[in-house]
Structures are given as structure tokens and as C-alpha cells.
Image (tube, rainbow, N blue to C red):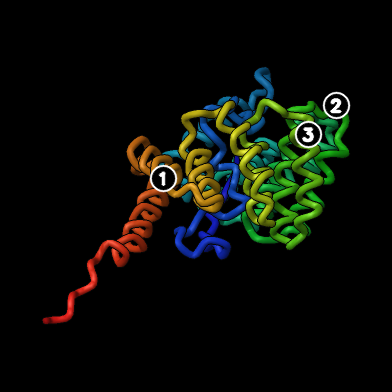
Amino acid sequence: MILLPLALLAIQAAPSLPASPDPMPPRRNRPEAAAPAPPPPAPQADDPASARYRQCTDQIRANAEAAVAAANTWRQEGGGIAARQCLGLALAALERWQAAATAFEQAAREAEGANDPRRPDFWAQAGNAWVAAGDGRKALAALDAALLSPNLTDELRGEVHLDRARARVAMADNDGARTELDRAAQLVPNDPFAWYLSAALARRVNDLPRAAADIAHARQLAPDSPDVLLLAGTIAGLQGNMAEAERLYRQVATAAPNSDAGRQAQESLATMREVEAPAATPTPQAPH
């Protein structure tokens, strides 16, 4: 899925703790122990565009700028839905979120006109790109369209509610985000990302008992996820268990040193050392 990096937010409730991941992180950070998010919908296997679509998506990995040009050429030649989808993916790879969202919306509308069953996937991709672009209202509009699609699976419906929660947080609607997350947890109870986001939102509104319960649930489903462990460390620290926070940060920093979570864990440990250093420095004795 299409996702964006978000800035770190300081934890105001615990000055001795370092910065922590944004309370509603992107789905790029979904715990890797979860069932993987479904790949972007591709053309049907018997569609003659399949080979060109695969070529286009392969090019995204090698050279996203070239893939944008190729997808635009294909679109102008009448490539239709598949060309628009590949264009959206290429633009997303370049973090050109507004343009990517527009490409996915165009694919979704074309899919609706053709009664193509992939249209909810395109609307969901558009919504995710609008969240990345920082436009919560447009994100909700696209995600609403996804929910209105017929024959929506519980898995995709749950994913849409997770994205709606992120959009509502971007609009400072924490209550609305809670409603979306609770619905997502009903639809995809075995997705650790749902519980991870629920814990993050609870932490955001300073509901630490709920945050602790939900991150514990996420850890049961994704015990080795650096992102889950990082948030678990932050919540432990907020509850006053600094030893557990340090243990979890060290685990993340050791297991995934080159990941975003690993780097944040290293920063957290450095901050903890800075906080502890003054207390460990002996006070000079006055001369007798």
C-alpha cells in the first residue's frame, strides 16, 4: 500500500522520554508479522495488458521517474485502468501524493464505469495517497467511495476503516478515529496493525490503560515487529517502567538497526542516557 513518513512527536506526558513515532503511523510501518497487505490490484490474468502492466511495475522498482513517463505514454495510447494504476504507483514511489491520488481516483472512476471489481482497491489507494498528501477530507471522500463498493471483503473493509482513522486524526477528530479503529478491530481482529494503531491513538489521548492493553494484543500477533516493540517501549516508559522501556528499545535497536523503528529506538536510548547522566555525576565536595 501507499504510505508516507510522518514526523516524530514529543511525548509531553513524560519529559524524560524521547520522541516517539507519530500516534497514527502510516501503513508502510505495518508489523511485518501481519498477513501482508494485498498487492495493488493488477489487470486480470487474461487481459492482454497484463504483460505491459508487469513491465511498468517492474520499472517502478528500477527507475520511478522513467516509469511515470512510460505509464503516461501507455495512458495516452489507451492503456486505460492498468495504465492509470501503474501511473499512480510510480507517482507514489516518488512521494508525489496529490498526483498519485488523482491517478488512482481516475482509475477508480474508470473501473466503476466498466463495472470492474477492483474499484474499491483503487478508491482505497486514492484515500491512502490523500492521507499521505495531508488532505484528510479528500481521503475520507475516496474511502467513503471504497466502502460503498459492492461485494467488499471484510479484510478490505477493515483496511479502509484503518485508513479512515488516520485521516480523522489528521483532521484532529480523535473521537471519530476511535470509532473507525473499533470497527476495524471487529473486521480484522487478527491484524496486529489494527491493535497497534488503537494503542497509538489511546496513547495520543493519554488513555494509558487502553494503550497498554492494545499494544499487548498487537505483540501477541506480531511479537517480533520493531514498530510494535518500539511503541510498547514508549508506553512502558509513560507508565513509569523505564527498565522495560529501555529493554524494548535495545531489542529494536539490535534487531532492526537500519529501519525507521531501529533508528528511533537508538535515539530514544541516547536520550535516556542524557537524562540519566546528570543524576550519575557526583556533586563536588567543598574543600575542608
Q: Where is residue 253 drawn, in percent x and y?
A: 36, 43
Q: Quadrant of residue 98?
A: bottom right
Judging by the rendered image, the residue that carries numbered circle 2 is 151
Q: Quadrant of the N terminus?
A: top right
Q: Which of these two is toward me, 135 or 175?
A: 175
- Cβ atoms under marks 2 and 3 closer than 8 Å: no
Q: Where is residue 29 drawn, in percent x and y?
A: 53, 42
Left or right: 98, with 226 as reference point: right
Left or right: 49, with 286 as reference point: right
Give the secondary structure at mark 1.
helix
Residue located 75% across and 40% down the image: 160
- Cβ atoms under marks 1 and 2 closer than 8 Å: no
The CA distance from mark 1 to mark 3 is 39 Å
Looking at the rendered image, the disc whose residue lies closer to the viewer, 1 or 2, is: 1
Label annotation for residue 157: 3
- N-terminal of the pair, mark 1 or mark 3, is 3
The amino acid sitting under disc 1 is Ala
The CA distance from mark 2 to mark 3 is 10 Å
Q: Where is residue 96 drawn, in percent x and y?
A: 57, 56
Q: Which of these two is toward me, 126 or 274?
A: 274
Residue located 66% across and 56% down the image: 206
Give the secondary structure at mark 3.
helix
Question: Could you tell me how many numbered marks the image carries?
Answer: 3
Label annotation for residue 48: none
Residue located 47% across and 50% down the image: 65
The furthest residue to the front: 288
The amino acid sitting under disc 2 is Asn
Looking at the rendered image, the disc whose residue lies closer to the viewer, 1 or 3, is: 1
Give the secondary structure at mark 2.
loop
Number of residues whose C-alpha sits closer than 10 Å to that of mark 3, classed few (under 14), some (14–19) or many (20 or more):
many
Q: Which of these two is toward me, 65 or 286?
A: 286
